[in-house]
Amino acid sequence: MGFCALAMDVGLTFRAQRIAQAAADAGAIAGAQEIGNSDLTSVAQQASAQNGVTNGVNGAVVTVNNPPTEGSHTSSSAYLEVIVQEPVSTVFMGFVTSNSMLNVAGRAVSSTGPAANCIYALATTGTNVTLSNSAKLTSSSCGVISDSSSSTAVSSTGSAQLNARATSIVGSYTTSNGGSITPSPITGITAVADPLAGMSPPTYNAAQCGADPLSHYNNGGSSYSVGPGSNFSTTQGGTLVCYTSLTLGSNGDTVTINPGIYVITGAMSFNSGTNLGGTGVLFYLVGSSASVTIQNGATVNLTAMTSGAYSGVLFFQDRADAHAASIEGGSSSVIDGVLYFPDAPLTVGNGTTTNIQTPMIAQTITFVGGSNFTNSQYANTPLTTPKLVE
């Protein structure tokens, strides 16, 4: 009987320790997605509770530390530590000692890193990823997701080439006339939700939206700035400006785009022959005629914000807006940041841009023209996934 009791104690303890570790892992994974937010602890503890250990119940303690208190990541707030401790009632120990309780513990450390995928086509029917006319997309560091259930959800034709880390499709794919997809796509996946669905749009005062500043610089060859702090612009709270439309450059203008959030309630265009650039910017497109066009031949250098609620997002078109967007640009353009057009078609091509860091989220995505695109996951991407590191 004594040996049976000992075996029961070992089994109970082993099982309890596994539950504690699973609860710590779950808490760390859930909490990692909230690093920097005030509800980090509650989210981590809720996940631990859903996996068997509830803080404060039956003597259990779930401790959440950001940064960790031990290990190799103690100095970094980019890491989260979850420690789960729980008393376990034993059988054998009660016969030989006055204490029949044994404490078990689990510990996990987590962080977030770039997601495995960086191109999402959200349309559930029809062809939602198209490459044609010798367009080449190389995305070796991240994958392509197609939510369409169509047998032609992804199409590569006319000597076009899609080379991605992986191409994953709810339906299937087609290649024709020399088109190729490498490696062979994974088909029959479960549809993937919009990874930025929880991102709230900027708030603004429509009554303070000003007219396009271009009307003040219509002679061509001008040098001027737009956005927060510039002439002919009304800055709303913080660094937000709003224009009823925005035409950047005309006849070779040089335009500096000041850092900030740009709300555009009408059409937005980057004109051919224009030299313009901006760092730390977000363009939010909303309205009955909202859309963006970057014309082939425009030299555009745009980089998204690196902190705040919109870190890593360059274009954000309102989720109720289906106006098509076109991103082209010249050979020396730099476009770094997420292109987010969740309810609209997006066309990329006809320029000669060779290196872009632009994760893309749209209903449909079309690559056209003879351009070579090398796409990589943006360093400040909001498309992240949690991972355990300890």
Image (cartoon, grey):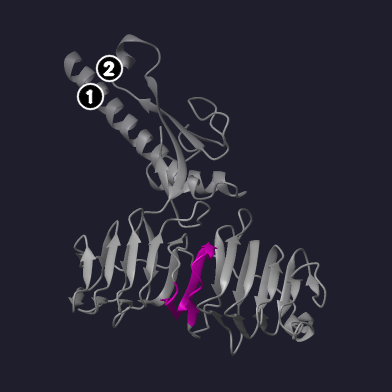
Q: Magenta segment range? A: 325-351
Q: Secondary structure at mark 1?
A: helix
- Callouts 1 and 2 close, C-beta under 8 Å: yes
Mark 2 is on which residue type?
Answer: Phe
The quadrant of the image that shows the C terminus is top left
Give the camera-side residue of 126 and 291. 291
Specify whether 281 is left or right of 372.
Answer: right
User: Dot 1: few (<14), some (14–19), or many (≥20) neighbours within 10 Å?
Assistant: some
Give the camera-side residue of 335 and 283. 335
Mark 1 is on which residue type?
Answer: Met
Residue 19 magenta-highlighted? no
Specify whether 342 is left or right of 261.
Answer: left
State the residue position of label 2: 92
Residue 244: x %, y % from top left: 70, 85
Give the camera-side residue of 91 and 109. 109
Specify whether 65 is left or right of 161.
Answer: right
Residue 148: x %, y % from top left: 29, 76
State the residue position of label 1: 8
Residue 344 magenta-highlighted? yes
Residue 26: x %, y % from top left: 40, 44
